Image (cartoon, grey):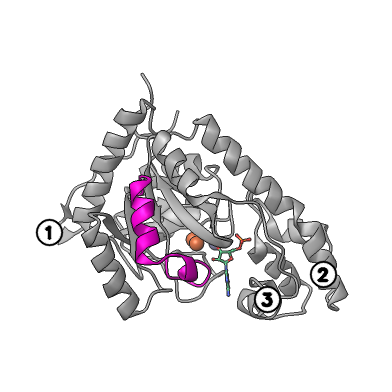
Amino acid sequence: MLPLPSLPLHRKRGRPLRIDLHTHSNVSDGTVSPDTLVHRAAAAGLDVVALTDHDTFDGWPIALTAADDTGVVVVPGAEISTRLRGAGVHVLGYLLDPTFEPLRDELTKVRDSRANRLARMTQLLTEAGLPVDVSDVLAAAGPATTIGRPHVADALVAKGYLTDRTEAFDRFLSEGGPAYVPKYALDVHEAVRLIRAAGGVAVLAHPWGRASRRVLDADTIAALARSGMDGIEVDHEDHSAQDRAALRAIAESLDLLITGSSDYHGTGKSGHELGVNTTDPAEYERLLERAAASTRVAGRGSPLRPIP
Ligand code: AMP
Ligand code: ZN
Ligand code: FE
Ligand code: FE
C-alpha cells in the first residue's frame, strides 16, 4: 500500500505554501528519478509537488516514499495524452485510483502506440541522414515506462548529431516535421470522464501551449467543463501574460480551478525550473475538496484513502 501524505496546511512557518502541480521524472521524459525530483522540490522550497508523468502511474510509490523522507507533500497524478479534432491535448489527472481498469487500459494503449511508432520514426530519421535504431532510443529512455519523442531526441544527441532536445524538435520531431509520427491518444472528453470515474480531478494542461492552442477556444473549454473537467492550468511557461489573463477569466466564468506549475523535465526543458510558476494555496485546497467529492461519487479508493 502507498504511504499516506500528511494533510496540507494553508501556511507553513508563517508563509504561504509553495505548490507546483505538474512535473515529470525519468519514468516518462523527465531526466531525474522520482526520488531525486522530490528531494529537488524540497531544496527548491516547495511544500507540495505533483508528480505527473506522461501516461503512467509508475513513479508514484518512489515519489510518495521520498515525500515521507523530505516532508514535501507529493500529489500523485499523471499527464494524459488525448486528442481533440486532430490536435494533441494534455489532461492532468490528480488523486485518482490507479487501479481503475478502464483508465489503465487506455494508458496501456497509449504507451504501446508510443513504443510502436519508434520503428517508423527511426526509419524516417535514418532516411533524413541521421542513422539511428530503436535500440538507441530505448537506451536513451533508460528506466522510462512511457517513451516519447524527447527520448528520440536524446538518442540523436547521444550520437552527436544534434546539441539538444530543442534542436531535435525544431528540425525533425515537431508535428509536421520530417520525422513526426502520430500516436494513439484517447478522446479528450473520454479522458476527463475516466479521470472522474477513477475518483480523480481533471485539469486541462497548458491549453494555449503549442499543440492545443488552435482547438481550445473558450466554447470548447466550456464543453470540457460540462464533461466534468475541474480546472485549467493557467500559469505555465507556454502562456504569455495576456494568455494567462484571458484563461483566468475563462476559468472564473466557468467556476473552474486555476492552477500553476513548472512542467519540470529536469535538464530536458530549459526555463521550466521547479516552482517557476505555482498554484495558489486556496486553489489547491479546492482541488483537494474536489478530489474527496470525486472519490465519493465514483465510489473508488484514492491514493490517499484506499478502499477499506
Ligand atoms: P510525445 O509525448 O512523444 O508526444 O512528446 C511530447 C513531449 O515532448 C512533451 O512532454 C513536451 O514537453 C516535449 N517537448 C515538446 N517540444 C519540445 C522541445 N522543443 N524541447 C524539449 N521538449 C519538448
Ligand atoms: Zn514531457
Ligand atoms: Fe504537456
Ligand atoms: Fe508536462
- Above or below, 210 against 73 in this view is below
Cα distance in 3D space between marks 1 and 2: 56 Å
Asked whether mark 3 and ligand 1 are closer than 8 Å, the reply comes as: yes
Report if residue 276 is visible in the image. yes
- Above or below, 303 against 25 in this view is above
Residue matched to label 2:
124
Residue matched to label 3:
168
Q: Is residue 214 magenta?
A: yes
Q: Amino acid at mark 2?
A: Leu
Residue 60: image x %, image y %?
A: 48, 42
Q: Is residue 241 left or right of residue 22?
A: left
Residue matched to label 1:
14
Assess disc 1: are there few (<14), some (14-19) or many (≥20) residues with their C-alpha within 10 Å of its C-alpha: few
Q: Nearer the viewer, mark 2 or mark 3?
A: 2
**Is the C-beta separation of discs 2 and 3 under 8 Å?**
no
**Mark 1: secondary structure:** loop
Q: Is residue 143 left or right of residue 196?
A: right
Q: Amino acid at mark 1?
A: Gly
Residue drawn at point x = 32 percent, y = 36 percent: 294
Cα distance in 3D space between marks 2 and 3: 13 Å
Residue in the foreground of this view, choosing between 167 and 19: 167
